[in-house]
Image (cartoon, rainbow, N blue to C red):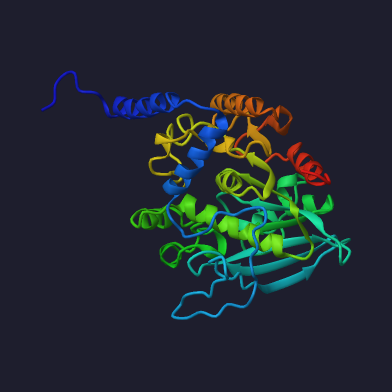
């Protein structure tokens, strides 16, 4: 029975959020104690994909897979073999660009571009970066290609070809195709609309019905992408970072939170609070993680990267990740890094712009951090 005292749906949702925020604030302990708990609860909320937690000494066999009844052969640690294959190799003016494919989880195959400086000397090893695209044309957007594979018309901005920017700084850059984008869209979506640019909705609802999340699948695949990148002969596996913007910022931040092999991260046009961004307006369903507010707000999840290096990039006029709550997120991250005694490992650039990649400071920052002999 409804009465004049009944709350509106908006007030009801605010009440749910406030209750969880209050409960989180009652949890005492150091940040490290909280971080260990949040990490366990994050893994549970993302859904079980059967991937072992990565460690700095993680060893992954490449091999060539033998599938029995559709199931991939696994190595001694229980992980499926990567079984990498080369799809394409193109020599350009400044770089060699490869298109590769390897196994991630559940028999899924991930495609990725690998961009290697033409100046690479056989036998040497370079720092490397994983690049995570947002909503749009998929991994091609990170290597200077349009959706149909033709070169983009350059504007001179770093965002035209992020992989090339890092290669020019002597690094190996890898741009994986996130599931649900590019060549990895769902067939049912392409049948209904050949021009659809992502399969996030149908992917997300199908996974949720199985107790899993798109965020979890993409995070696990990101860890497997790190396995592959670390296996390449050109790569110094002790000097690998990542960079992601918007939806790619979610992938970069969650995978770095769970994979300590990622030594430095740039997370752009995404860091915020859940309350101020994805709960304040309509966002893609791939952003939502069931029950996460029982355990953490977005700044807490980004804080799991500490004490490793973190650079936050945000547009002052971003309409979907508002700068006011980005500043709230930054203040909380600064408190975490300060408590751990590593204030110098957190940096940010709030640039004049909207929901777009800048790279004005972050590219050089990441290249300089990863060029250090000790991280």
Q: Residue at x 41, y 66 (%)?
A: 188
Q: Which residue is the extreme one toward the top?
A: 5
> Visible in this render: residue 322?
yes
Based on the displayed image, in which of its 4 quarters is residue 121 positioned? bottom right
- Residue 162 place in picture, x, y as percent: 73, 50
In this rendering, would 323 be left or right of 48? right
- The mark total stands at 0
Q: Position of residue 7 (x, y in %)?
A: 24, 23
Up-down relation of residue 79 to residue 254 (above or below): below
| Residue 311 or residue 34, whichever sits in front | 34
Q: Position of residue 155 (x, y in %)?
A: 75, 47
Q: Specify the quadrant that holds the C terminus.
A: top right
Q: In front here: 22 or 151?
A: 22
Quadrant housing the N terminus: top left
* The one of 128 and 44 positioned closer to us in this rendering: 44
Please, is residue 312 above or below residue 89 in the view?
Answer: above
Q: Is residue 320 visible?
A: no
Quarter holding residue 97: bottom right
Q: Is residue 52 above or below residue 109?
A: above
Residue 232 image point, x, y percent? 73, 65
In which image quadrant can residue 84 be found? Answer: bottom right
- Residue 95 vs 362, above or below: the answer is below
Camera-nearest residue between 351 and 83:
83
Farthest residue to the left: give it: 1
């Amino acid at each position: 029975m409804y009465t004049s005292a009944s709350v509106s749906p908006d007030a009801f949702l605010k009440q749910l959020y406030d209750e969880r925020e209050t409960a989180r604030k009652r949890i005492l302990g150091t940040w490290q104690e909280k971080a260990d708990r949040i990490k366990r609860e994050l893994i549970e909320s993302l859904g079980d994909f059967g991937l072992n937690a990565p460690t700095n000494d993680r060893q992954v066999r490449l091999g060539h897979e033998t599938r029995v009844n559709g199931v991939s052969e696994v190595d001694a640690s229980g992980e499926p073999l990567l079984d990498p294959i080369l799809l394409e190799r193109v020599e350009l003016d400044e770089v060699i660009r490869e298109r590769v494919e390897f196994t991630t989880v559940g028999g899924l195959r991930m495609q990725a571009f690998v961009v290697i400086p033409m100046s690479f000397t056989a036998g040497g090893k370079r720092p490397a970066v994983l690049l995570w695209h947002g909503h749009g044309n998929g991994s091609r957007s990170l290597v200077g290609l349009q959706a149909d594979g033709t070169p983009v018309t350059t504007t001179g901005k770093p965002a035209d070809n992020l992989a090339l920017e890092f290669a020019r700084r002597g690094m190996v850059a890898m741009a994986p195709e996130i599931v649900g984008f590019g060549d990895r869209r769902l067939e049912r979506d392409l049948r209904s609309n050949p021009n659809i640019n992502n399969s996030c909705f149908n992917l997300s609802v199908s996974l949720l019905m199985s107790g899993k999340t798109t965020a979890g699948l993409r995070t696990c695949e990101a860890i497997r992408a790190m396995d592959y990148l670390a296996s390449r002969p050109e790569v110094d596996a002790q000097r690998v970072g990542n960079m992601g913007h918007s939806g790619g910022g979610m992938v970069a931040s969650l995978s770095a939170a769970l994979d300590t092999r990622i030594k430095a991260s740039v997370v752009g046009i995404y860091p915020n609070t859940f309350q101020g961004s994805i709960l304040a307006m309509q966002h893609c369903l791939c952003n939502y993680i069931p029950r996460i507010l029982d355990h953490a707000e977005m700044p807490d999840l980004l804080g799991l990267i500490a004490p490793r290096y973190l650079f936050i990039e945000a547009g002052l006029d971003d309409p979907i990740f508002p700068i006011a709550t980005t500043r709230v997120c930054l203040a909380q991250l600064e408190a975490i890094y300060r408590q751990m005694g590593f204030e110098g490992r957190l940096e940010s650039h709030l640039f004049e712009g909207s929901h777009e990649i800048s790279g004005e400071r972050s590219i050089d920052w990441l290249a300089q951090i990863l060029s250090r002999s000790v991280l």
